[in-house]
Amino acid sequence: METKSDGRRISTHAVCTAIRDDIVSGVFPPGARLIEELLARRYGVSRVPVREALRTLASEGFVVTRRHAGACVAEPTEQEAADLLDVRALLEPLGAARAAQRRTEAHLKVLRGLVRLGQDRARGGRTGELRPLGDWFDETLAQASGSPSLAALLTQLRRKITWVYGGEQSARPVADWEACGALVDAVARRDAERARFLAAARAHRSPGEFRLRRPEPPARGSGPKRSVNTASAPS
């Protein structure tokens, strides 16, 4: 934790989130070098939280450390990318079944609200607004499982899939959000087996629906300077 000149406190978590977001969005492509000094300048922090953030990202699989090259963005193989989808197909049904058993009324309220918004946006053709809603839906469903460890695994898995597959838009958004609605209904009824079945169907897609993000030549430097969002960063 460090303090900026204006008194705001910046956590390693905030720096880690900023770097991870830039990796997932493609600002730093696979294989790109992550130079501490340039990253510190980009996010307006010292090298200490950057160094700690890179260690965390290495443990998550987003960063690797190479001899004579330092930290670089990881370059997942096609097999590693395919494995992510297999793990998703195993964990998401488990999370949904647990959510059916352990969800609260607060979870249901958020999930139902997101389904209404998602269906409205999908039917109105506002597909550009669906990805953040989908991420929020998945995160809330994972939290409803009542297992912080499982929720953390699902969140990390979702980030990695978005990273390696480029986060493409669904070709059938209306059907996707109808499936989300059916899943919430099962969770509301505490029907764990039905929730597991629907989550498995939702997690399963043919390989053709996923296209790997192709690596691009590493960008020079560290990109434009970016401020770390300190307002929501935990202390």
Image (cartoon, rainbow, N blue to C red):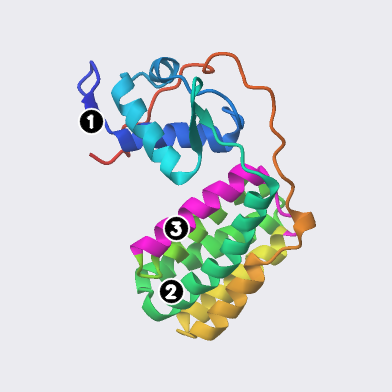
- Name the residue that disc number 3 marks: 153
Q: Examine the structure image and report whether residue 206 is included in the region drawn in magenta.
A: no
Q: Amino acid at mark 3?
A: Leu
Disc 2 crowd rating (10 Å Cα; few below 14, some 14-19, many 20+) is many
Query: Could you say whether the residue bearing mark 2 is in a helix, strand or loop?
Result: helix
Whether residue 171 is visible, yes or no, is no
Query: What residue is pinned by disc 2?
Result: 99
In the picture, the quarter occupied by the N terminus is: top left
The kind of secondary structure element at disc 3 is: helix
Q: Amino acid at mark 2?
A: Ala
Q: Secondary structure at mark 1?
A: loop
Quadrant hosting residue 42: top left
Query: What segment is highlighted magenta in the picture?
Result: 148-172
Examine the rendered structure and indicate whether residue 154 appears above or below residue 13: below
N-term mark: 1 or 3? 1
Q: Nearer the viewer, mark 1 or mark 2?
A: 1
Neighbor class of circle 1 (other Cα within 10 Å; few <14, some 14-19, many 20+) is: few
Quick one: label 2 or label 3, which is nearer the N terminus? 2
Residue situated in front as seen by the camera: 75 or 141: 75
Q: In the displayed structure, does residue 106 sit left or right of residue 217?
A: left
Q: Position of residue 159 (x, y in %)?
A: 53, 48
Could you give the CA–CA distance between mark 2 and mark 3, rounded to whole angstroms? 15 Å
For this orientation, the residue located farthest to the front is 67
What's the amino acid at mark 1? Met
Rendering coords of residue 15 (x, y %): 37, 31
The residue drawn where x is 56% and y is 64% is 115
Please report the residue visible at 34 percent of the width from the left and 62 percent of the height from the top.
Answer: 148
Label of residue 1 in the image: 1
In this rendered view, identify the residue nearer to me: 233 or 55.
55
Q: Name the disc covering residue 48, or none.
A: none
Q: Dot 3: within a 10 Å radius of its alpha carbon, few (fewer than 14), some, or many (20 or more) residues? A: some
Camera-side residue of 197 and 173: 197
